[in-house]
Amino acid sequence: MRRTKALPAIALVASASLVLGACGGGGGGSSDANGGDATIAEMAVARGESGDGYTAPDTKQSDQIVVSTDKAFTSYNNATEDANQSYNTFALVLAQPGAHILNGNNKYSLNKDTMESVEVTSKSPQVVTWKLKKGVTWSDGEAWDCDDFYMAWFTQSNSAKKADAGKYFKPAGTTGYDLMTGECKDDQTFVGSFSAPYPDYIGMFNNDVLPAHILEKNAGIADITKLNKDSAPADIQKAADFWNEKWNGFTKDLMPGAGPYMLTAFEPNQSVTLERNPKWAGKPGGPAKIILKAVPDPVAQAQALENGEVAVNSMAQPDANAATKLKGLSAQGITFGAGPGLSFEHLDIQFKNPVLAKEEIRKAFFMCVKRQDIIDKLITEVQADAKPLGSLIFFPKDEGYKDVYADKAKGDPAEAKKILTDAGWAQGADGVFAKDGVRASFRISHTDIPRRKQTVELIQGQCKEAGIEVKDDTDPNFLDERVSQGDYDVALFAWSGGPLKSDKKSIYETGGGQNWQNLSVPAADAAMKEAVSQTSISESLKFFAKADEEIANAYGSLPLFQMPNMWAFKELDRVYFQSYYGALWNANEWQTK
């Protein structure tokens, strides 16, 4: 999911953002820029923020910082449908700058180290002008300029179609870009003309701006800005082949940085290393080197922090045992933070599965899952007031939130049995319902994160009471290799996005780039199309609410809970886990205590 001077941007943030709360706390506080103690809540705001803009501040220099995370970085191009995942975003945030930064309170600020302005220069039709700051370069010395913005638009708009109407590029999402025609007025000016109003433009060009000069050189394209929907198919295909496939993993010559840091080393399934970018246009970052290390076991992450092997735990995956351990380490100078994030744990149904394609099976499955029991056992130690999530599009504190799943997921095995019995299913000798030789049996696929395996174990017991057999399919590579191929019966994972609701369109619309479950709800498609074309956020929310309700009625995906973020650190002045960009969103500002 994806994720100024213009007043509509300010209104958008105020109405669409979810402000994170923080709970827990740590050993002796943390020194702020003025030498005082910064609370966890205060750490949500970057030191370089001022008004509606951000400029990297003067930061005390330090040496290497090691940061643990749950899963490994896999791809430099996180905008493709096959690569797109949060753990890439966490690593790339300081190497691939965009038009805005997003702080811990989910407020957008213009990135004044890279941008002069982002303004709506015409309201009807809507035209937005992105004015880039002169002198910003990639770490290889090439300019970070309008060519890069043009490529981000062209590759994600799907404006170029093959003769058979297929797509050349494979973006994870097209929302917003598909409504726009892009043009470079000069090296520093990108103009987007929209075919319909798009109020969420502030979310564009923030984590998907890649080096156009690298693609041009390696794909044999003379000038990416001359490529358009009417260009020779062979030229478009050359560009698509490189964009889709050649920015996986890390190859130094192909993957420069344009932010305060650049990637310099990569160990598959283990770690990625960032070092200060000597060509960075802004003030240099504090740590000379940041190693982002994958440690799937959250308790092992906490142990590594206690032992001094890492300085920061950044956990997108909440874990009760790790939280208990970290809370007990305050006397050692370890600060613990937690709060509701912008991710949600859920169960996606694969509609190509012949068992789950039957509506009564989906209804009975939703009814037998006891979500509050899962939360009580696995989440409340991290966030005491966590409750079942009642929406796929909204979070509980969002304007427009309505619980549309409470009556569909009561955790009632007796009612689940009745749903199946009324549909002509009968329990066999093994206690599992069957009909016409088909058993109510399917697998739940997920990664090897301990909490997810525990979740499936709980669901297995809950649904066994309802005569439904659930099998555990644990695969460490599920998110990297299988989920985007739709290789599952039920998928257990979390979606993470920015605060803008338009992020959800590519997941739930028919044929969407991230709609791997083959869900198709025409009424929801129509509502989301209307939602992203309104002139105000408040109007768009009405249509998103309609889409949310229609998807719920299709029993396509069951939200479990809003994911709490949790993090901990020591010997640094201030660290905050930003829900979309992770702990490194402002790591250039980190200072040792």
Image: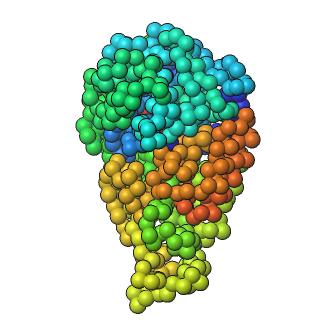
Residue 519, image x, y percentages: 52, 57
View extreme (front): residue: 163
Is residue 314 visible in the rendered image? The answer is: no
Residue 297, placed above or below residue 145: below
Depth order, front residue of 425/229: 229
Q: Residue at x 36, y 26 (%)?
A: 235
**Total tally of numbered discs in the picture:** 0
Q: Residue furthest left?
A: 267
Q: Residue at x 74, y 41 (%)?
A: 539
428 vs 117, left or right, is left
In the displayed structure, would residue 390 be above or below residue 182?
below
The answer to which of 361 and 196 lies nearer the viewer is 196
Where's residue 250, x and y in %?
Answer: 29, 32
User: Is residue 318 rendered to the left or right of residue 474?
Assistant: right
User: Is residue 546 rendered to the left or right of residue 557?
Assistant: right
> Residue 21: x and y, percent?
60, 43
In percent of width and height, residue 383 lies at 55, 53
Q: Where is 264 relative to 300, above or below?
A: above
Which residue is drawn at the image coordinates 37% and 58% (left, top)? Answer: 487
Seen from the viewer's position, the closer of residues 502 and 335 is 502
Q: Quadrant of the C terminus?
A: top left
Q: Residue at x 39, y 87 (%)?
A: 430
Residue 12 appearing in the image: yes
Q: Quadrant of residue 193?
A: top right
Q: Which sits in the foreground, 484 or 49?
A: 484
